[in-house]
Image (tube, rainbow, N blue to C red):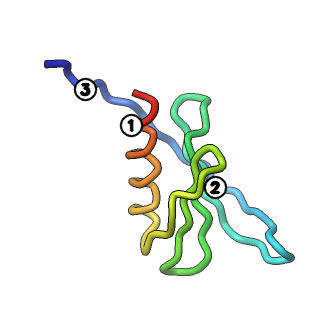
């Protein structure tokens, strides 16, 4: 059985202007490669994206980040 190796994911905070409104964005990276980003539309609405693919809305930032990491694990490993 293959052992899982640990991968360090880090995030960077930025903002994006959409239709005249500025939203906070959390960008997720493994090494120097961006694996996704989360747009925060409010205290309970977080939209996940990976490679221009809309992964859906989550109620917390942690769930949105988990969605991106799960997608990366499924498609990149």
On the rendered structure, is 8 left or right of 23?
left
| Residue drawn at 43 percent across, 70 percent down | 60
**Residue at which label 2 appears:** 13
On the rendered structure, is 13 left or right of 72?
right
Mark on residue 41? none
Residue 27 percent coordinates (x, y): 61, 50
Q: Earlier in the sequence, mark 3 or mark 1?
A: 3
**Residue at which label 1 appears:** 73
Using the image, determine if residue 42 lies above or below residue 14.
below
- Of 42 and 49, which appears nearest the observer? 49
Mark on residue 4? 3
| Residue drawn at 59 percent across, 70 percent down | 40
Q: Earlier in the sequence, mark 1 or mark 2?
A: 2
Q: Residue furthest left?
A: 1
Using the image, determine if residue 11 lies above or below residue 58.
above
Disc 3 and disc 1 in contact, CB within 8 angstroms:
no
Judged from the image, the secondary structure of the residue bearing numbered disc 1 is helix
Residue 55 percent coordinates (x, y): 51, 57
Residue 48 percent coordinates (x, y): 54, 59
Q: Quadrant of residue 2?
A: top left
For the C terminus, give its image quadrant: top left
């Amino acid at each position: 059985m293959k052992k899982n190796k640990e991968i360090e994911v880090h995030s960077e905070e930025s903002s994006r202007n959409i239709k005249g409104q500025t939203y906070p964005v959390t960008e997720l990276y493994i090494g120097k490669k961006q694996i996704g980003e989360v747009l925060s539309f409010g205290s309970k609405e977080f939209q996940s994206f990976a490679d221009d693919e809309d992964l859906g809305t989550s109620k917390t930032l942690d769930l949105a980040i988990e969605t991106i990491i799960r997608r990366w694990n499924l498609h990149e490993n």
